[in-house]
């Protein structure tokens, strides 16, 4: 079975969030099940610089956005196809915004070209080469791929799947972009790519794909409601029979406290001494008081309202009042960045803030923290809580999306049967979060109970093996096998 992934980022070459982790790990898990998987990504400078074992190059003429080359290569165990188009991708900033944080004005062309190249790969044009039987696109940046496929003769079309990683980001552009993208006017319809008078990349993917997946069962239900559907809930309800919620996994080779080279000391569920060493080292690194008895809460996140970090700015005082510490790593909305930086200045030795994203530090915070806070308003899946569970760092999460599917609340009942792995709360409210933080600190000071919760979490299996098997079953289904 030949499957092409289409995505805007892939770990370890380029990453802004969890999408890159998924695209970097799921193909490897599928390959272990016998699937021939290639990943098509834009040729950003970091991708080209990190590409190993470069193979042949193919000239693409008549591509949306201008001519380009398709480059074959590899990084680690990932087989990559890189769209080398310097006029689209060789620029400062991240994959989506410039160095000043503004969206690139030609993002419709930058990712339209990626989608067009994916459809070209599955077409008979270009002679002998690897051709996918199924194209699996990820998020809005791949959304036009099924639309381009729909323009192909029926007998030539590959099967198509679109995965929603976060429905809030949809890739909406002016209707005038249709011409530059080579899409016929007939597609600009509510039964097509039209979304409230604009061109919707993700809308196109959801309309034209054979099947749709999203990254947790709970989120699959939530996005069919007006509250979480971002204007696409009607379409998703219409396609309910084709919509699957498959919980993400994590790369257990990259995230493994027993072998993690970023840590000052490794550890396992059977020997947690290294976690205590990691906590002290993290406290010293971040300028916190090296107090082994102070519960250390960590945050590794984009600092945005959707992640509920504004609630923590209000509720965080409850941590300090109970003798705890708080360490935050992330960047995002200015008011939240300023808020956590201000809290760190006001509470030296008890609150630490580090801006941006630092992968090695993220590993050390997962290892050195006692609990990780994820108070999201909406969270399609979330990987951070899974990293926390694997590293024995107890998640404190709001009951939504994949957080609800991957963390089991600590109650007398779940403790008695060995299922408790974290602390959950329901309401989008600072007082509800403060209540959950207070519960967590009380559990922390009950050392036998806390150790049981930690071990329960570390024994969970969030590897990609289980999820990959579900995707493979879906692939067989959509291919009619």
Image (cartoon, helix red, strand yellow):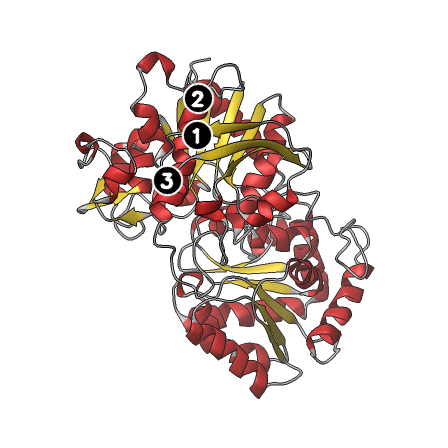
Task: Give the residue number, with chain letter if any, for mark 2.
Answer: 122
Q: Position of residue 388 (x, y in %)?
A: 63, 55
277 displayed left or right of 406: right
31 displayed left or right of 278: left
Q: Is residue 140 visible?
A: no
Q: Nearer the viewer, mark 2 or mark 3?
A: 3
Residue 353 circle label: none
Pick whichever, 337 or 96, lies toward us.
96
**Relative vertical location of residue 83 with respect to residue 378 in this rendering, above or below:** above
Q: Residue at x 80, y 62 (%)?
A: 264
**Relative vertical location of residue 71 with respect to residue 370 in this rendering, above or below:** above
Q: Quadrant of residue 212?
A: top left
Residue lying furthest bottom in this view? 346
Q: Position of residue 138 (x, y in %)?
A: 44, 39
Pick whichever, 54 or 199, lies toward us.
54
Q: Quadrant of the N terminus?
A: top right
Task: Give the residue number, with chain letter if any, for mark 3.
Answer: 65
Pick whichever, 443 or 461, lies toward us.
461
Query: Are the residues at dot 2 and dot 3 in contact (C-beta closer than 8 Å)?
Result: no
Q: Position of residue 267 (x, y in %)?
A: 79, 54
Q: Quadrant of residue 115?
A: top left
Q: Position of residue 134 (x, y in %)?
A: 45, 23
Gap between marks 1 and 3 measured at Cα:
14 Å
Q: Is residue 430 visible?
A: yes
Gap between marks 2 and 3 measured at Cα:
19 Å
Query: Are the residues at dot 1 and dot 3 in contact (C-beta closer than 8 Å)?
Result: no
Query: Are the residues at dot 2 and dot 1 in contact (C-beta closer than 8 Å)?
Result: yes
**SS for callout 1:** helix
**SS for callout 2:** loop
């Amino acid at each position: 079975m030949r499957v092409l992934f289409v995505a805007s980022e892939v770990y370890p070459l380029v990453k802004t969030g969890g999408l890159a982790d998924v695209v970097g790990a799921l193909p490897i898990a599928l390959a272990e099940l016998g699937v021939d998987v290639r990943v098509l990504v834009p040729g950003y400078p970091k991708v080209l610089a990190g590409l190993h074992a470069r193979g042949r190059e193919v000239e693409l003429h008549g591509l949306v956005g201008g001519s380009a080359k398709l480059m074959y290569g590899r990084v680690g165990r990932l087989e990559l196809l890189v769209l080398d188009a310097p006029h689209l991708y060789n620029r400062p900033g991240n994959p989506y915004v410039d160095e000043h944080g503004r969206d690139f004005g030609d993002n419709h062309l930058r990712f339209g070209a990626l989608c067009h190249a994916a459809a070209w790969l599955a077409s008979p044009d270009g002679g002998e080469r690897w051709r996918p039987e199924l194209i699996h696109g990820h998020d809005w940046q791949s959304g036009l791929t099924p639309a381009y496929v729909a323009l192909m003769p029926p007998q030539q079309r590959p099967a198509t799947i679109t995965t929603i990683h976060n429905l809030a980001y949809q890739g909406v552009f002016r209707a005038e972009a249709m011409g530059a993208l080579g899409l016929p006017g007939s597609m600009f319809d509510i039964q097509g790519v039209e979304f409230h008078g604009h061109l919707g990349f993700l809308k196109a993917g959801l309309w034209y794909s054979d099947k749709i997946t999203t990254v947790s069962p709970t989120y699959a239900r939530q996005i069919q409601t007006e509250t979480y559907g971002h204007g696409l809930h009607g379409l998703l309800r219409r396609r309910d029979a084709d919509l699957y919620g498959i919980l993400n996994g994590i790369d257990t080779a990259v995230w493994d406290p027993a072998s993690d080279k970023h840590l000052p000391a490794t550890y396992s569920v059977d020997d947690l001494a290294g976690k205590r060493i990691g906590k002290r080292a993290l406290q010293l690194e971040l300028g916190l008081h090296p107090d082994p008895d102070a519960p250390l809460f960590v945050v590794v996140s984009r600092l945005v309202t959707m992640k509920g970090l504004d609630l923590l700015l209000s509720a965080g005082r409850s941590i300090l009042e109970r003798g705890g510490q708080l360490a935050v790593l992330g960047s995002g909305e200015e008011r939240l960045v300023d808020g956590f930086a201000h809290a760190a200045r006001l509470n030296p030795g008890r609150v630490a803030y580090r801006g941006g994203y630092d992968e090695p530090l993220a590993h050390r915070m997962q290892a050195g923290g006692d609990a990780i806070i994820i108070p999201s308003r909406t969270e399609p899946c979330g990987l951070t809580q899974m990293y926390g569970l694997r590293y024995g760092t107890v998640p404190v999460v709001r009951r939504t999306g994949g957080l609800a599917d991957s963390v089991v609340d600590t109650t007398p009942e779940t403790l008695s049967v060995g299922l408790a792995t974290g602390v959950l709360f329901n309401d989008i409210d600072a007082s509800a979060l403060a209540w959950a933080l207070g519960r967590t600190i009380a559990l922390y000071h009950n050392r036998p109970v806390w150790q049981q919760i930690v071990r329960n979490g570390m024994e969970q299996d969030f590897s990609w093996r289980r999820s990959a098997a579900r995707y493979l079953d879906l692939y067989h289904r959509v291919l009619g096998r």
